[in-house]
């Protein structure tokens, strides 16, 4: 089998609004998802699908350019079943841009599964669980708005609520956490996510200690990704587990987080890691260190979310509830058959490969949209 063509379709999809406005965190406002859909075609008539997703500075058409001009030439004419080999070829062709590599690699797993008539989770070692419990994020807002939003998600079945913190208003952060805890009650897990928003370890420690009375499950990435010494300092000083997110972008950075004692938990992304292979490697590294992981979200559309779910049901050290419900953050999705996400759980598609099919009419409409029209 040979890869004959790789086609990329840039798309824009509106995010669901929060409190009647744009969903905002310490990473900034996010009105749209500016991504690309990947189709990898073969000479045996099997086509794999993937997503190129990113919430960071290099996204959309910039990533599209990287994929088209550097990564596609590295895989054309190659056997799509040689995933490790092709990932190495892409690494040699272009350093970084893991999100672009993940989009192609996702499609390769889809092809392999279709060729073998097996779901991707079977190719990753088989299921160790049937479903994944989900967390849901509450963005910046007034405390009463955040509390109402959290209650809505609990009613929808989510048993873990993540409150976005790390704003420039410390009192607002603390009041938001307090309001959400009081609204959801003691039986729902509550975590906070700094999204790298706090400037120093001292500031982060002060903020976390102020929030600890509200029975936090964990604290996620309070400091910039590079500040592993600061993360380790925070970890030693607080009374709740610390989770590394943006600090864990690939196996090499995961090794540094583990080696330097910078986290109790790893948050693993299929897209940030460069695909399912590297994401599974990161899980294995944390497992060898006796640490659990969860799966984070950009948030993805249905293709990327399906890949996350396949990963999650196959990983033995999946720990805290995961964010594998990116489709819920969008106004619509592009799959012909929606993913099964119900009562706070995500279930893997059962068909071969990723088990998803793109609705080409939705894809065409999304491809005609632009940021100006999508964010209105």
Image: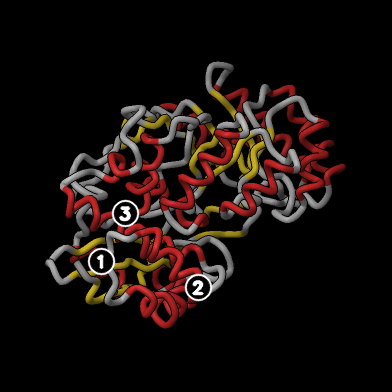
Mark 1 and mark 2 residues within 8 Å of each other at the beta carbon = no
Secondary structure type for disc 1: helix
Q: Position of residue 40 (x, y in %)?
A: 26, 68
Residue sitting at x 76%, y 34%: 235
**Hey, which quadrant is residue 37 in on the image?**
bottom left
Residue sitting at x 61%, y 46%: 245
| Closer to the eye: label 3 or 1 | 3
The answer to whether any part of residue 373 appears in the image is yes
Residue sitting at x 60%, y 31%: 291
Q: Point out the tag, 3 or 2, that comes first from the N-terminus.
A: 2
Where 194 falls versus 288 (above or below)? Answer: below
Secondary structure type for disc 2: helix
Mark 3–mark 1 Cα distance, whole angstroms, equals 12 Å
Q: Residue under circle 2? A: 92
Q: Position of residue 123 (x, y in %)?
A: 30, 44
Where 353 falls versus 258 (above or below)? Answer: below
Q: Residue under circle 3? A: 303
* The disc label shown at residue 363, or none: 1
**Hey, which quadrant is residue 265 in on the image?**
top right
Name the side, left or right, on which 232 lies relative to 245.
Answer: right
């Amino acid at each position: 089998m040979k890869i004959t063509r790789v086609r990329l379709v840039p798309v824009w999809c509106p995010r669901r609004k929060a409190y009647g406005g744009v969903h905002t965190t310490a990473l900034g406002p996010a009105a749209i998802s500016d991504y690309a859909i990947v189709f990898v075609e073969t000479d045996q008539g099997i086509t794999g699908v993937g997503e190129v997703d990113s919430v960071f500075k290099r996204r959309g058409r910039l990533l599209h350019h990287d994929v088209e001009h550097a990564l596609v030439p590295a895989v054309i004419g190659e056997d799509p079943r040689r995933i490790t080999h092709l990932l190495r070829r892409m690494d040699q062709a272009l350093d970084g841009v893991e999100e672009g590599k993940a989009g192609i690699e996702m499609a390769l797993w889809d092809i392999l599964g279709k060729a073998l008539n097996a779901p991707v989770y079977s190719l990753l070692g088989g299921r160790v669980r049937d479903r994944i419990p989900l967390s849901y994020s509450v963005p910046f807002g007034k405390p009463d708005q955040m509390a109402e939003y959290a209650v809505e998600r609990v009613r929808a079945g989510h048993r873990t609520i993540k409150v976005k913190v790390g704003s420039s208003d410390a009192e607002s952060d603390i009041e938001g956490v307090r309001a959400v805890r009081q609204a959801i009650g003691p039986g729902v897990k509550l975590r906070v996510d700094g999204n790298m928003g706090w400037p120093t370890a001292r500031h982060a420690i002060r903020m976390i200690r102020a929030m600890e009375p509200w029975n936090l499950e964990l604290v996620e990435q309070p400091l910039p990704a590079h500040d592993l010494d600061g993360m380790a300092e925070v970890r030693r000083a607080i009374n709740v587990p610390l989770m590394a997110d943006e600090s864990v972008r690939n196996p090499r950075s995961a090794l540094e987080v583990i080696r330097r004692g910078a986290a109790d938990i790893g948050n693993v992304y299929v897209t940030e890691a460069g695909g399912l292979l590297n994401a599974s490697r990161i899980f294995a590294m944390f497992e060898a260190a006796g640490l659990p992981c969860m799966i984070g979200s950009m948030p993805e559309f249905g293709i990327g979310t399906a890949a996350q779910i396949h990963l999650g049901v196959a990983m033995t050290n999946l720990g805290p509830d995961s964010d594998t419900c990116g489709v819920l953050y969008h106004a619509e999705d592009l799959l012909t058959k929606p993913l099964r996400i119900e009562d706070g759980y995500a279930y893997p598609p059962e068909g071969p490969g990723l088990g998803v099919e793109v609705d080409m009419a939705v894809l065409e409409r999304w491809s005609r949209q632009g940021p100006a029209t999508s964010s209105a």
